[in-house]
Amino acid sequence: MATTIQAVPPALSARRRWTVLAVCCLSMFLVGLDTTIVNVGLPAIGRGLHAGTRSLEWTVDAYTLVLASLLITSGAMADRFGRRRVFRLGLSVFALASLLCAIAPSVEVLVAARAVQGIGASMLSPVALAIVVNAMPDPRERAQAIGVWAAVFGLSMAVGPVMGGALVAAFGWRSVFWINAPVIVIALVLSSVFVPESRAQRPQRLDLPGQLLLTAVIGISVAVLIEGPHIGWTSSGALCAYGFTAAAAAGFVRVESRRSDPLMDPRLFRTPAFRSAFLGAVAVFVALNLTLLLNTLYLQHTRGWTPLAAGTATLPMAVGAVFCAPLSGRMTGRGGPRLPLLLAGGFMTAGGLCLVRLDADTGVPLLLLAYLLIGTGFGFANAPITNTAVSGLPPARAAVAGAITSTARQFGAAIGIAVAGGLVAGADPAGLARASRPGWVLVTACGLFLFLVARSARRPAAIGG
């Protein structure tokens, strides 16, 4: 049975709607920023806390794993308990965890604090997208708004390395966590003034078995990618992990298929457009996070660049993402998702191909061109993927719809980090470039996959009220 929602009032003015969007974008900037700002500081963190590559991978993936695992449940909690309430709770948890990260005395404490950050971030992303969807009843305006939202999210992820490099150079690695404080204060104030409270009249019931099984699938699959190079891909521990992942995935599908109000309805994936959007989101974020981590390790370890220089090298990526995301939103609103997805696939494929023969002396112009192409592809991809996925569910499930897409993104991010770390684990600075080449092949493959996503894409139907 379809449910209805006490959404943003229909009489809300255009100015107020776009103000609400701005507040939501601020929270998304925070979530995206913390996904990537730490990357450029990893070598400094390793030196400061005497941590190896494997621990540094967990410093990044502890955040993305928890975030990916809890997004859908947080979206359901927002529908039940109120979006603004959950949003503000998420900001508070995020602030506390950022403080713990900033004062962490060991890498173990840092990893644990990053996991708590993921809990807070999971309460921000789905709520923000749900508010955007419900504030923009017109399909064309909604597509444009999602384009802006995607641009801010892309900006946060792309400029994270630049900001992180500047902060590490000036104040040390702990400053990348202190920087969250002013953003959180601003978001808390603006949300109390501009974001209206809303909740579903018939909210989704919390699905504890589904949540536990989903967490197991995501956590074990990424953990084995991180630990595989160290324990051996055919070791007894790895084989057990494969079996547990398969069993948890099968159990998740079985449990969710039998629930009247599932955490993630498996029937959604029978729709080619939704299934392609989900897989496309995974592919895009695998490519983005592979690029960011491999860039950080290559430029700092192999080329001897400073954190600031390595972060600044990603500026072309940020420019491409920020310029193309709003354009992609307008294109999606006017003509559907196919053309921007084709452009995304073309640019990302070209960027990956630029670096498949990477070596220690690759020219800087080629590096910058590759980052620009990958950032442009990322900018074109987000809006059509998000709009297609969100349009597959009614407004009453907007928070859950946004959470499913965000789960795909963060799962892709975690896989990208794990694969990048696995490729270069144990490589010396001289051999790191060659060791990273399969990663650039994977970036190219992700770009090619977007052509398949474009084939399944169609102009999404309007979300009914």
Image: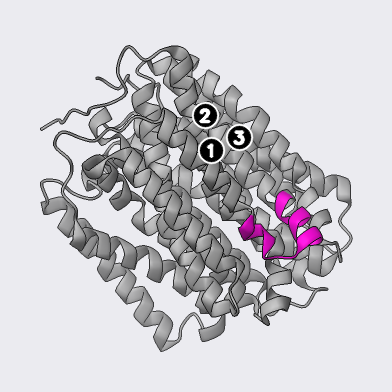
* Viewer-proximal residue among 34 and 138: 34
Q: Is residue 64 left or right of residue 81?
A: right
Q: Are marks 1 and 2 in contact (CB under 8 Å)?
A: yes
Q: Is residue 243 above or below residue 19?
A: below
Crowding at label 1, few (<14), some or many (≥20) Cα neighbours within 10 Å? many
**Considering only order in the chain, which callout, 1 or 3, is on the residue closer to the N terminus?**
1
Could you tell me residue 285's position as x and y percent?
A: 54, 49
* Residue at which label 1 appears: 26
**Considering only order in the chain, which callout, 3 or 2, is on the residue closer to the N terminus?**
2
Q: Secondary structure at mark 3?
A: helix
Q: Which mark is residue 379?
A: 3
Give the main secondary structure of the magenta stretch: helix
Q: Which residues are magenta?
A: 163-178
Res. 41 visible in picture: yes
| Mark pair 3, 1: CA separation | 18 Å
User: Which residue corresponds to the image point at 18% horizontal and 44% vertical from the top-left?
Assistant: 204
| Mark pair 1, 2: CA separation | 6 Å
| Mark pair 2, 3: CA separation | 18 Å
Q: Secondary structure at mark 1?
A: helix
